[in-house]
Amino acid sequence: NAGVTQTPKFQVLKTGQSMTLQCAQDMNHNSMYWYRQDPGMGLRLIYYSASEGTTDKGEVPNGYNVSRLNKREFSLRLESAAPSQTSVYFCASKMDRTNYGYTFGSGTRLTVV
Amino acid sequence: AQSVAQPEDQVNVAEGNPLTVKCTYSVSGNPYLFWYVQYPNRGLQFLLKYITGDNLVKGSYGFEAEFNKSQTSFHLKKPSALVSDSALYFCAVRDQTGANNLFFGTGTRLTVIP
């Protein structure tokens, strides 16, 4: 089925470890996004990529890096995980500036101990 | 800066009764507003959007939302709630700086009681 695929679904890290969250979409969308979801705070934008080859910071970029590997894939990297990064991470995509309907992945639940 | 507020963390409604999930917004200029729903262990799903035109917007699963400019509100409504409507609902507003990102509210958990 077409959509946004995130891997892994669950992950436990120790403080200081690094990891990369993977996201891929097969809808030929131009824009891709990484959000984190925390209780009582809704979704907050970490980074986004308006098109292949470009990335920009969102509301809460500190502690993260991203790579727009190609049009399909947009990865999120935690270089040195901290307990404050315990969250549920969502990747999303949309076609272009005129289409405001985001398609979300099913999320990655990350725990940093 | 643009933002949305969802004043209720939790809304409970009996099955068959009408439901309302509230959202107010703050933007400079014309707002682009959205509602999304999140079922357990799933990503968000698009319900409906207001860009321009009629103040009453119809969306998926029988939901609708009423845009009220004077009250800066965009409340989500459904005439008759189903148990399957129980989920987490998010209101969102489009970033007006040109990046076209969405800013989300904190979410409202709707529970429909059989």
Image: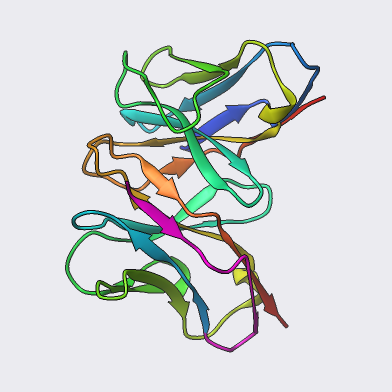
At 52% from the left and 25% from the top, the residue drawn is A23
For this view, does B22 lie left or right of residue B50? right
Q: Which of B64 and B30 is in front in this view?
A: B30
Judge from the rendering whether residue B9 lies leftward or rightward of residue B52; answer left or right: right
Q: Is residue A33 above or below residue B80?
A: above
Snapshot quadrant of residue A31: top left
In the depicted view, which residue is nearer to us: B104 or A73?
A: B104
Q: Residue A46: where, in percent of width, then height? A: 49, 29
In the rendered structure, which segment of residues is drawn in magenta?
Answer: B1-18
Picture coordinates of residue B14, whole percent (x, y): 66, 86
Q: Is residue B63 visible?
A: no
- x, y (%) of residue B88? 60, 60
Seen as rendered, the residue at the extreme bottom is B17
What is the quadrant of residue B46 in the picture?
bottom left
Q: In which quarter of the image is the C terminus of chain A?
A: top right
Can residue B23 be seen in the rendering of this structure? yes
A23 in relation to A77, above or below? below
Residue beneath the point at 73% across and 83% down? B114
**x and y percentages locating residue A35 in the rendered image:** 51, 35
Applied colour scheme: rainbow
Q: Give me the residue at 59% from left, 70% from top.
A: B85
Count of residue discs: 0
Q: Nearer the viewer, residue A67 or B70?
A: B70
Q: Say whether residue B113 is left or right of residue A25.
A: right
Q: Is residue A56 magenta?
A: no
Q: Residue at x 25, y 75 (%)?
A: B70
Q: Is residue B52 above or below residue A1?
A: below
